[in-house]
Amino acid sequence: MGAIAFSNPRGGLGRGAVAVALILLIASASVGIYYLFQKGQGTGGAHPSGSSCVDPLGGATLTETPQGAVASYPAGDVVRTQLAPPTTIGGVTEYQLPTPIRAPNAPAVAPDGSVWFAETSVAGLAHFYPANRTLVEYPWPYDYPAPPAPGGLCGPKTSVWSVVLWNGEVWATDSGGNQLVALDPSTGMYTSVKVPTNGSFPYTLTPGPGDTLWFTELFAGKIGELSQNGTIREFPVPGGTSAYPSQIVFANSTSGYFSTVGDLEPQGGGVYSFNVGHYSPQLLGGQHLVDPTSLSLGSGALWVALHGTSSVAFYNFTTDAWSYFPTTSVFWYGSPVTTLPYFVSASGASVWTNEHYGNRMARITPANGSLVEYSESSLPTNANTIGNALTFAVGGGRAWFVEQTGNVLGYADSAYSPGFYTSVSGNTTLVVHRGAGATVDLVVHDTGHRGPLRLTFSDSESYLSTPENLTFGVPSSSVSPALGGEATVPVTVSALQSLKPGEYYAILTATDGLTFESSFIRIVVPA
């Protein structure tokens, strides 16, 4: 629930699915631009029992309206609880959030390692302290009718896709109120700033140069800039209301980039560069992309999550060229589906992304050409078992995520070792002629795993990352290196005559079923 693209899993992402799914998320829209100040004192205690989807925290004033029951929380209200000890599976640790379901989204990691996130069924913000498992919930003092609760799940009262720390406050987008909302954590008080364009669907937030806060207006075809004094400036993006601007990043004080999903545009979406002082967006690399929903700068490149595919894109500023890195293939009910990378975040030497349909967190290390994918569950991955980890944030070597329907806050730990890893022996660039093949050696290293590991292969030739015109041959589909040793597996990569000449990327993977350890290779197919 709440995903931008939740399309036919067997057919990949259909054109127009983004727009249709997002329209369903809008709860309300409002007009004008002003500050709304709320006053009051936090209660600091737990509410009595009797909580429900209308009043998840308990203790609200309930009002019946033509749109349904509305829960009004006092300004400055605070609820504190302690979460149960977490469960850990492989490299993922998860904390179950209180019930009724909080429908969490948009985590942000604070400098002290604590985690902020939105609770869209409350609606409000929450602050989690991992050291003592304390959860502090701050309901918004704004009124939203409670949506229906199919299957007993509390639906979002608003959509919140971004939370950031800016100017000493915690800021969030609020699509239902068509506003940006700020929490002062020292007082528990909220301030809101209305977006000038009605029905804009404020989506993601990015602190920008000159102490400004930038945001995307998904349905208005604009990006916005908020100054410290509350003034908003709006800038149109190429493609207008069909573009769906998704995220903004800044390279320095003058240069920025934004992505547009562009699902209704004939050529698709893209990434645009712009100058902060002289706004005139230019399509990066002159190339359109398939549903770019997020971007991040790191390792000397621009990384883009391509939500309509199973790949992450990489723009090399030195060569001015795009490359595409596949993720490990996923099968639902026996058929391949797109893994749907949703957001991407470069942090230090790593580039993280979340695989929405894959129910995994993934970490790319460009320096050694490796990919590690961490399963969020040991259950078979399909439409009924994914937790809907739609957003995430990186901090302290952890990629924190929330599962909107799983009602979970968790993290993938980059320090986790499954007891094995992979590498490629020799040159990682393979020249493969059509109608012929070439061999590369995959080395699987054991550091304490014990037992067989399954081998799988994916490549960048299709949206699904499943091999079609490229094939990968190995002596066996599994490998069992000796404890503390390694096993070398010759992989024969063959190209069919039907494969178009060009450059492709592939991953050679070993997995224990929970963690996927892969090495990238580059495949050049001459004309």
Image (tube, helix red, strand yellow):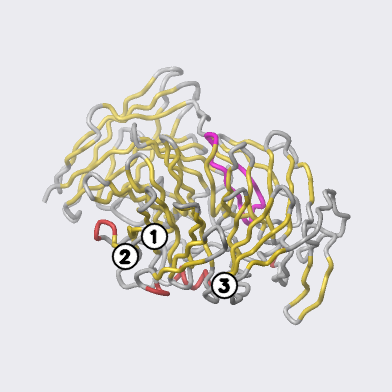
User: Does 196 sit above or below residue 357?
Assistant: below
Name the quadrant of the N terminus.
bottom right
Q: Secondary structure at mark 2?
A: loop
Q: Disc 3 to disc 1, how far (Cα)?
A: 22 Å
Q: Indicate whether residue 243 is drawn in magenta.
A: no
For residue 24, the mark is 3
Which residues, given as a range, are shown in magenta?
396-410
Please give the name of the residue rendered at 38% of the width and 30% of the height, measured from the top-left corner.
422
Mark 2 surroundings: few (<14), some (14-19) or many (≥20) residues within 10 A:
some
User: Does 13 sit above or below residue 370?
Assistant: below
| Horizontal side, residue 154 vs residue 432: left or right | right
Q: Earlier in the sequence, mark 3 or mark 1?
A: 3
The residue labelled by disc 2 is 280
For residue 259, the mark is 1
Q: Indicate whether residue 403 is drawn in magenta.
A: yes
Please give the name of the residue rendered at 75% of the width and 82% of the height, measured from the top-left corner.
66
Q: Position of residue 183 (x, y in %)?
A: 67, 55
